[in-house]
Structure formats: C-alpha cells, structure tokens
Image (spheres, rainbow, N blue to C red):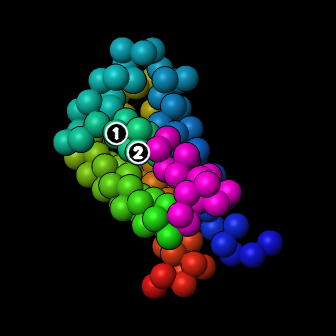
C-alpha cells in the first residue's frame, strides 16, 4: 500500500483514538463527574473530539479522491494542530487534585498524557499525508 492511501488511514485511526480516549471518563465515571473533569481546564477537550470527527470525514474524502487530496491534507493538518493544542492546554491546566480525587484515580493518572499522545498523532499523520502528496 502506498503512502498516499496509508497516511490518511493512519489519520483516521488517530482521530478515532482521540475520540475513544475522550470517552473513557464517561464510561468509568458518572456523567456529572466526567463533565466536571473536562470543564476544569482552560479549554474543554471535547472541542478536540469535534475537530477529530470532522477530520475523520476529511481524511476519508481525501483518501477516496472525493475531495482534493491536497486540500484534505492541509485542512487535516490545521485541524490536527487545533486538536493537539486543545488537548495540550487542557492537560497542562487541569488541576491534579481533581484528577486524583476520583475513586478510579489509577485509571486517570495517565489519561491526560494518553490524550495528548493520541492528539499529537493527528497532525503527525496529516504531515505524513502532505509529504506523501509531495506538498512539502
């Protein structure tokens, strides 16, 4: 499989992983606690989920040639930077005392870090896609 088709597939997987990581607190905690967990930082990281959902569609459209692949790669790169930015700012600004106050604190000890890693995979895969298209 060539990089022009593989890179957007990796981008789709990265976007879905961001959404799944953001869904973990809703599975492990009560809905009110998960809402409090996400709204205590500077930005709500659920905005990253919104951008990730849009990027799934754009990566898929670029991969299947339904949209201009160069445009799809560029849009996903910009949206991926926003996804990573939302995740990083939230991970840095959420109070640690809140993270460790939940009864399942072992599950949340590294949740912020996993979210940042998953979020960074989106712009990395979009950059790979732009390189595969020979745009940069």
Residue 45: x percent and y percent?
Answer: 34, 40
Q: Please tell me whether mark 2 sits on a helix, a strand or a loop.
A: helix
Quick check: 5 left or right of 130?
right
Regarding residue 5, the answer to whether it shows in the image is yes
Whether 102 is among the magenta residues is: no
The residue depicted at 55 percent of the width and 47 percent of the height is 56
Label 1 neighbourhood size at 10 Å, few (<14), some (14-19), many (20+)? some
Above/below status of 42 relative to 24: below
Quick check: 65 left or right of 86?
right
The residue depicted at 36 percent of the width and 62 percent of the height is 78
Residue 38: x percent and y percent?
Answer: 32, 32
Above/below status of 4 relative to 84: below
Q: Residue furthest left?
A: 42
* Of residues 63 and 93, the one drawn nearer to the viewer in this rendering: 63
Is the Cβ of the residue at disc 2 closer than 8 Å to that at disc 1? Answer: yes
Regarding residue 15, the answer to whether it shows in the image is no
Q: Which residue lies under the disc numbered 1?
A: 47
* Of residues 134 and 82, the one drawn nearer to the viewer in this rendering: 134
Q: Which residue lies under the disc numbered 2?
A: 51
Whether 59 is among the magenta residues is: yes
* Of residues 132 and 121, the one drawn nearer to the viewer in this rendering: 132
Residue 12: x percent and y percent?
Answer: 60, 52
Quick check: 125 left or right of 49?
right
**Could you give the CA–CA distance between mark 2 and mark 1, rounded to whole angstroms?**
6 Å
Quadrant assignment for the N terminus: bottom right
Q: Which residues fall within the magenta stretch?
A: 53-69
The residue depicted at 55 percent of the width and 57 percent of the height is 67
Label 2 neighbourhood size at 10 Å, few (<14), some (14-19), many (20+)? some
Q: Please tell me whether mark 1 sits on a helix, a strand or a loop.
A: helix
Quadrant assignment for the C terminus: bottom left
* Of residues 85 and 105, the one drawn nearer to the viewer in this rendering: 85
Q: How many marks?
A: 2
């Amino acid at each position: 499989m060539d990089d022009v088709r593989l890179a957007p597939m990796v981008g789709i997987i990265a976007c879905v992983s961001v959404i799944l990581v953001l869904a973990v607190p809703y599975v492990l905690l009560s809905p009110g606690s998960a809402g409090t967990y996400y709204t205590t930082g500077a930005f709500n990281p659920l905005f990253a989920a919104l951008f990730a959902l849009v990027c799934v569609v754009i990566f898929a459209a670029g991969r299947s040639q339904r949209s201009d692949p160069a445009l799809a790669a560029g849009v996903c790169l910009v949206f991926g930077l926003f996804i990573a930015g939302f995740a990083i700012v939230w991970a840095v600004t959420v109070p640690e005392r809140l993270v460790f106050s939940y009864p399942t604190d072992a599950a949340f000890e590294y949740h912020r870090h996993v979210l940042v890693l998953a979020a960074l995979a989106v712009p990395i895969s979009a950059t790979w896609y732009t390189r595969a298209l020979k745009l940069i």
